[in-house]
Amino acid sequence: MNKLVAKHPEMLTSQNKILFRETAPIVKIAVTKAARVSVRAVSCNNRKNTRARSSRKGVKGQKFESDMTFRASSMAGRSFKLLSHLPYMHAPTPLSRQISMDAKSFVSQLNGAGLLRSQGLIGGRWSDAYDGNTIKVHNPATGEVITTVPCMGQRETNDAISSAYDAFSSWSNLTASERSKYLRKWYDLIISHKEELGQLITLEQGKPLKEAIGEVNYGAAFIEFYAEEAKRVYGDIIPATLADRRLFVLKQPVGVVGAVSPWNFPLAMITRKVGPALACGCTVVIKPSEYTPLTALAAAELALQAGIPPGVVNVVMGNASEIGDALLASPQVRKITFTGSTAVGKKLMAGAAGTVKKVSLELGGNAPCIVFDDADLDVAVKGTLAAKFRNSGQTCVCANRIIVQEGIYEKFMDAFVKAVQNLQVGDGFSEGVVQGPLINEAAVQKVESFVQDALSKGAQVVLGAKRHSLGMTFYEPTVLRDVKSDMLISREEVFGPVAPLLRFKTEEEAIRIANDTNAGLAAYIFTNSIQRSWRVSEALEYGLVGVNEGLVSTEVAPFGGVKQSGLGREGSKYGMDEYLEVKYVCMGNMSSN
């Protein structure tokens, strides 16, 4: 165990199954200035053929945009691409050297635990890219290269699909109890390695270590839950209309699943998809984000250690457009599940039409957080802080618009700003840090563009609104006041640590403002009126509503959006239905001897 964790064991003891309840204010301390540029280079090195790096012609002429483009990352309506051609640079400051030493220590420990995998997984075998090309995986806090992974493409993906297809028959024919035991063993291994997995998440994604370990607990909870749900897939007997007939319904696994996961929750978004898929009897090809592939590979290693048969779980990463096209084109893939931007989700949905696949989409949000005059101020501030600043604002359910009734507006703003001021920013391995870096400099530039648009249209800075002195991937927690609905930050997902405050007068106006968006994933209400909470919850056009609570995600409840925030549900018993086909059987002439 590393010296940081040994010194602070409280980081490891949380068994909380709901995400990251460590949002209490923390006293802010001074931070050392260290300018670093951290721009993620995601293109494959020295690729001899002309693979497209962010999009290419796909099924039926559609383009598959890779998750190299940020979810909801438009700048004045135009896609904001990663600056993958720029080099990494960081100043050789004492802080930089210390972080580098810590990172090397964590990498060494992960290697020792056998969890730092740097190859894809196809048919139970670890594999390089067939042409030998690789991608560098960076630490977003420092710009350091952690390791390289294969830059895979169409050929590797097709082989992974074939492996999953070959494994499907035997896996789906296991009893539910047998599949449940495999999943339970996988869960046990994830929990037993939660410290190492948390370190890995912090290394490649940047979130604070305590929050990363919280994600491991949360992600593991899906495997545990679906280990039990595997034994609860029931059919039906239907009363027949004719005496000599018997009618019944079977539920059967859909088949091979292509699971495309994002970088902001590199473990939990995989287990939330793979858990129910395996429980139902499906096999999977996982395509993790190029920014955070290491956590997916570590989870796959633990799946192998749990005895899950070869081919049931496969992992490919690299050229997102080629991998996506292969998943869409293959008739052996019967289901696509995706978490990411609405723009990419639309293209996946169109591409899946060519082979008429089932599709689950968890897409971008634009979450309103409505604070009524009768709200408990402390509850509202704490809940809004959690809903906004978890993972430095890089979640699809983050409060994107904080809509405050005029009678409590100033009082709420003052209390909220004081709480935000106490959020300590820094490297995720540093003690006391609750706000890590953004995923790369392109993310920071996107946040800057949203803030600049708001200021140009009359919004006022209350706190922050600039890059942090720590470096190019860090942005100061920010509060803006006098924000209007026509500003870009109110129309699109900022995906960063910026809290825009809007004002409203009546309940009807709050509902109108909240619903004035094409998104419909999560919404939050703070009120002490049970009648109002019920009325507003019903009126909000969102898939999830938190009432006097900013952290609502849990494995036992359905997660998903309406409108352009997606299709289908993940988590809970409803998440099983996404991986099942319903088969009706009619047996006739049953009265004959």
Image (spheres, rainbow, N blue to C red):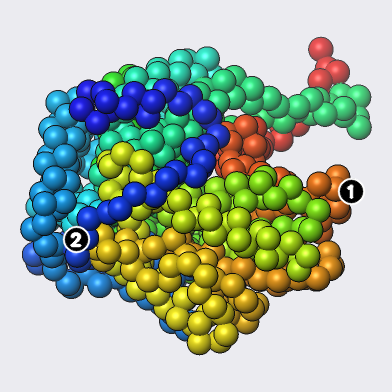
Residue 109 sits in which quadrant? top left
Residue in the image at 37% along x and 71% along y: 466
Residue in the image at 72% along x and 58% along y: 371
Query: Could you classify mark 2 by the number of other residues whose Cα lies within 10 Å: few (under 14), some (14-19), or many (20 or more)?
Result: some
Of the pair 21 and 328, the residue shown nearer to us: 21
2 or 1: tag closer to the N-terminus: 2
**Is residue 108 visible from the viewing direction of this image?**
yes
Q: Spot the residue most to the top.
A: 593
Q: Is residue 395 left or right of residue 212?
A: right
**Is residue 219 visible from the viewing direction of this image?**
no
Total labels: the figure holds 2
Q: Amino acid at mark 1?
A: Gln
Q: Is residue 274 left or right of residue 542?
A: left
Q: Position of residue 143 (x, y in %)?
A: 18, 57
Residue holding disc 1: 531
Q: Spot the residue most to the bottom.
A: 456
Residue holding disc 2: 34
Q: Disc 2 vs disc 1: which is toward the camera?
A: 2
Q: Position of residue 396 (x, y in %)?
A: 52, 56
Q: Position of residue 42 (x, y in %)?
A: 23, 62
Of the pair 173 and 110, the residue shown nearer to us: 110
